[in-house]
Image: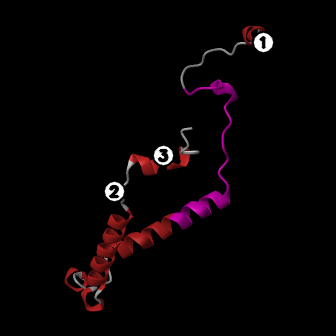
């Protein structure tokens, strides 16, 4: 029945890739005042952001090494060192097959 429905389905004329309706029935979007206002507001925000990006607050000399006074690099290195040690602790190199399959052992009787 599904095949019959697919075969008897009315066919649409092939209009080419990306075209679903003919040009005579095309729907034209009307530009409202709100759309213009919204676009203008977005452009103003973008221009303000670009202004901040073009003129940074700190110079390159000021921004280089500003975190050294806080000791953030030493804390970061110490934290990464601890994470690496903890990761190595979690690895268990001495795991044997007997330990892996111990849950499958029901009983040890061979009687």
Q: Position of residue 101 (x, y in %)?
A: 48, 46
- Secondary element under disc 1, as helix, strand or loop, is helix
Q: Decide: is 72 above or below 1.
A: below
Q: Decide: is 46 above or below 28.
A: below
Kindly indicate whether the residue at mark 3 contacts the one at mark 2 (C-beta within 8 angstroms).
no
What residue does disc 3 label?
101
What residue does disc 1 label?
5
Mark 3, Cα crowd under 10 Å, few <14 / some 14-19 / many 20+, is few
Which quarter of the picture shows residue 5? Answer: top right
Mark 2, Cα crowd under 10 Å, few <14 / some 14-19 / many 20+, is few
The quadrant of the image that shows the N terminus is: top right
The magenta region covers: 18-42
Q: Position of residue 92 (x, y in %)?
A: 36, 59
Numbered label attached to residue 94? 2
- Secondary element under disc 2, as helix, strand or loop, is loop
- Which of pointers 1 and 3 indicates the residue nearer the eye? 3
Q: Earlier in the sequence, mark 1 or mark 3?
A: 1
């Amino acid at each position: 029945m599904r095949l019959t429905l697919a075969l008897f389905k009315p066919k649409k004329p092939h209009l080419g890739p990306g075209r679903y309706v003919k040009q005579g029935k095309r729907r034209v979007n009307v530009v409202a005042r709100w759309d213009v206002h919204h676009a203008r507001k977005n452009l103003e925000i973008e221009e303000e952001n670009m202004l901040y990006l073009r003129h940074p607050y700190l110079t390159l000399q000021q921004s280089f090494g500003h975190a050294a006074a806080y000791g953030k690099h030493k804390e970061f290195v110490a934290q990464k060192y601890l994470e690496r040690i903890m990761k190595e602790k979690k690895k268990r190199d001495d795991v044997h097959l007997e330990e892996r399959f111990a849950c499958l052992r029901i009983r040890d009787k061979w009687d």
